[in-house]
Image: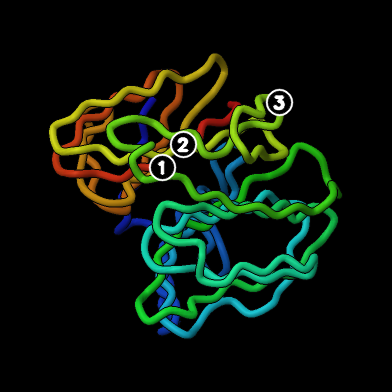
Amino acid sequence: MNKKIENKNMGKANHGWLNTSYHFSFADYYNPDNIDFGVLRVLNDDIIQPKTGFDMHPHKNMEIITYVIDGELTHKDSNGNVNVNTISRGDLQYMSAGCGIFHSEHNLGEVPLRLLQIWIRPDKPNLKSQYGDLSLPWSKRNNKWLKMISAKNEKDTEISINQDASILVSWLEKDHPLEFKLSENKQAYIVQIEGKSLINKIELNQRDAMEIIGENVNIKAIEDSHFLLIEMKK
């Protein structure tokens, strides 16, 4: 089963400093028919203006992944982790909120910061909070999948999360095909970050998404395209 989610139909908020699309119910956007997809609870496509951001605030019992598309991200948290202007295009940040953590996320740069904010429910509550970030050469995702985060029991990447879910990205050149074979009893959520493509013969434009259950993912780029794919248990 394939379900296309057009960006124009997603929840929206524009606070001036922050312009965002909500893939699922979040903040002032509430849709009882669109709370989550499996263990994926939040996916926000945020554009944060220069010299602004999210001040220190708490989280608990959530696996939080941030994937930077444009600009530079600055992170601080109550565990003493500080990362200033080094998380940039194609990099990701991981924070397991666990038993509780405070953090801030800012754009201290001169250009807008675009990122995907992803929340995944952990497999157990009140785990120890953790932080990590990852930068890999862009070439590792050219016309192929780059696995950036692995499921808890796989540990085949530098960062694994407390859930049976993994995250991959790809940059696909125009007219190039790409396949992803879903593991048994898994489903996928894929985001068309940039560009335009056919995914299982359905056209997706920039910032659209798709839920895929019970079949593999077959992509052909209509134009140069950037994707993020989350594979998780059904």
| Residue 210, position as x, y percentages in the image | 37, 39
User: What kind of element bears circle 2?
Assistant: strand
> Which labelled disc corresponds to residue 228?
1
User: What kind of element bears circle 3?
Assistant: loop
| Residue 136, position as x, y percentages in the image | 46, 45
Q: For marks 3 and 1, give the CA distance.
A: 21 Å
> Which labelled disc corresponds to residue 168?
2
Whether residue 12 is visible? no
Whether residue 203 is visible? yes
Residue type marked 3: Asn
Find out whether the residues at labels 3 and 1 contact each other: C-beta distance under 8 Å. no
- Where is 46 relative to 64, above or below? below
Circle 2 residues within 10 Å: few <14, some 14–19, many ≥20: some
Circle 3 residues within 10 Å: few <14, some 14–19, many ≥20: few
Q: For marks 2 and 1, give the CA distance.
A: 6 Å
User: What kind of element bears circle 1?
Assistant: strand
Q: Which residue is under mark 3? A: 153
Residue type marked 2: Leu
Quadrant of the snapshot with the C terminus: top right
Circle 1 residues within 10 Å: few <14, some 14–19, many ≥20: many
Image quarter of residue 159: top right
Find out whether the residues at labels 2 and 1 contact each other: C-beta distance under 8 Å. yes
| Residue 185, position as x, y percentages in the image | 57, 18
Front residue of 30/2: it is: 2
Which of marks 1 and 3 precedes in the sequence? 3
Looking at the image, residue 84 sits to the left or right of residue 21; the answer is right
